[in-house]
Amino acid sequence: MPTACAVPLQVFSTWPGVEADSAGISSGASVLLSSEQIDWADIIFVMEKTHRNKLRSRFRPHLNNKRVICLDIPDDYEFMDPVLVRMLENRVGRFLAQAAPTTRDEPDEPAP
């Protein structure tokens, strides 16, 4: 059975400025997605269109003003499969770079 739903947490929780969580939408998931997780999220990524459809069906009231992105990655990889990790980094990474807060360079204060 695929265990890919936990991979994003392992991969992106180490990225600076990113807080990641992971859950499944299917009844057999080890961690089932909750409305609290959706409320917490700024961006929600799903692997397949079927996941997006289930998400919308079960959690529609919680998805207002939420960005849901389908990565079009088949959910048939094993945990931390190197091919899956590379695809996630490439496909998710561009959205995380856009979502990262920008910092303004300010001059250093002179030492007293």
Image: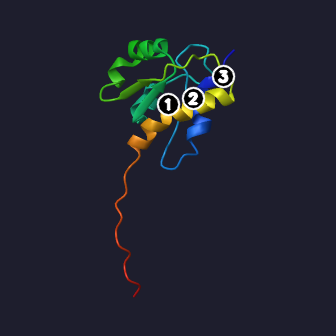
Q: Which residue is mark 3?
A: 3
- Check if mark 1's residue and mark 2's residue have beta carbons within 8 Å: yes
Q: Which secondary structure lies at badge 2?
A: helix
Q: Which secondary structure lies at badge 3?
A: loop
Please give the name of the residue rendered at 36% of the width and 29% of the height, measured from the top-left corner. Answer: 67
Report the amino acid beneath label 2: Met
- Across and down, in percent, residue 20 comes to 52, 38
Is residue 80 something one can see in this rendering? no
Q: Circle 1: is it few (<14), some (14-19), or many (20+) Cα within 10 Å?
A: some
Q: Measure the alpha-carbon separation of dots 1 and 2.
A: 6 Å
Q: Circle 3: is it few (<14), some (14-19), or many (20+) Cα within 10 Å?
A: some
Q: Which numbered marker is on residue 91?
A: 1
Is residue 44 something one can see in this rendering? yes
- Across and down, in percent, residue 57 comes to 39, 12
Q: Which residue is mark 2?
A: 87
Q: Measure the alpha-carbon separation of dots 1 and 3.
A: 19 Å
